[in-house]
Image (spheres, rainbow, N blue to C red):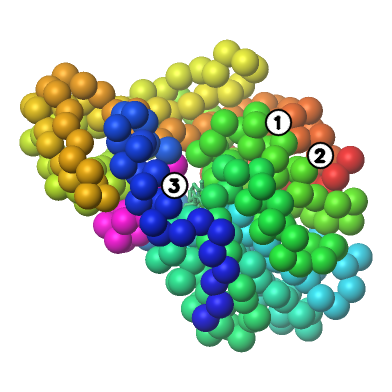
Amino acid sequence: MNIEVLLTEAEIAHEFAEALEARDLPEKFFYWFPLSVRAWRELSQSEEHQPLNRAWNVIGEKAQSITRHFGKAVPVISFGAGDGSKDRALMQALRSAGRQVKYFPVDASQALLEIACADAEDDEIEVLGIKADISSPMHLMLASDAAESPKLFLMAGNTLGGFDPLEQVRHVADCLHAEDRLVIDGELYRPEALPAAAQTDAKKLAFAPLASIGVTEEDGQIRFEQKRDERHEGLYMITKRFHADRDLRVTVAAREIQMARGERIFMNFHYLYTPEAFRWLLEKKGGLEVLEQTLSPDGRFITAVCAKK
Ligand SMILES: C[S@@+](CC[C@H](N)C(=O)[O-])C[C@H]1O[C@@H](n2cnc3c(N)ncnc32)[C@H](O)[C@@H]1O
């Protein structure tokens, strides 16, 4: 198994301790610990998640036409690939059509990358995992240089919504050349998204980094909140905050960190969009042309096929 490392485990451990000191844990730490990996895989295979998995199966059926102008070879670069399960159907469809797929899953989670690489190898797809920080424009660029254009970029599982999408979409779009394509999804806003986000499997995922360093549910609780992002109509976010119910002392990367009762830790968030706001992000903030946009049958997710304008 080949994995190129732009972001080391030591760097992630150091960043985690710094983030905990700053009381602000970004998205990548929610998929890094073994407990997080287990919680994510349970959630992504749950009933709740099936409509999105089905939406990616539909994209798989269109993969041939999306990449028709590529020639025989199709390099697939997936930003925030996770265990690669959503990318897999698409690559299998391309392979069945006789295309030569080379897969580059990009992720900060070593454990998830290993699964993505192993599954691709099982499918006899040539694969090079890239362990990188996709919030870094430099890492995105280096990862996208792993293959020659034309290439197919994927960003699945509302991965864009785990970052500031106005910034992140620009950085992702900067990686595309004229003949490249990007398939990206987003979760749509609906009033009942907040209770769904706070259901048991999702709570487990949110709590996993803290549980991994010995914090228990008696030590405090996570509160979920839904907000509007006033920068543009149709942008919403679900935020999470941990509230300590008692004084805490944890040891992370050989550093002791104390937290007083009543303190809060800002945790990861995810964005939700109206269909119009999602299109606005891609076109106006990313400078992309939306070639095709599809709603999942249950109306919860949107996928777009994009090209550089
Ligand atoms: C919501 S999951 C989606 C995973 C996969 N695409 C899917 O749909 O099943 C987000 C993925 O992005 C990765 N991720 C989050 N922040 C990251 C960062 N800063 N750098 C690299 N990967 C990151 C996580 O490890 C996780 O695998």
Q: Is mark 2 within 8 Å of ligand 1?
A: no
Q: Is residue 35 magenta?
A: yes
Please report the residue visible at 55 percent of the width from the left and 18 percent of the height from the top: 229
Sequence order check, earlier mark of 2 and 1: 1
Please indicate whether residue 238 sits to the left or right of residue 129 in the image.
Answer: left
Q: In this view, does 298 lie above or below 59?
A: above
Nearer to us of marks 2 and 3 is 3
Q: Is residue 89 above or below residue 143?
A: below
Q: In which quarter of the image is residue 130?
A: bottom right
Label 2 sits on residue: 288
Give, as a single range, the part of the protein colored magenta. Answer: 27-40
Please indicate whether residue 273 sits to the left or right of residue 288 in the image.
Answer: left
Disc 2 is placed on an element classified as strand
Please report the residue visible at 89 percent of the width from the left and 73 percent of the height from the top: 71
Please report the residue visible at 63 percent of the width from the left and 51 percent of the height from the top: 139
Front residue of 145/103: it is 145
Q: Counting other residues with Cα less than 10 Å from the Cα at mark 2, is it few (<14), some (14-19), or many (20 or more)?
A: many
Image marks 2 and 3: residues in contact by CB distance under 8 Å:
no
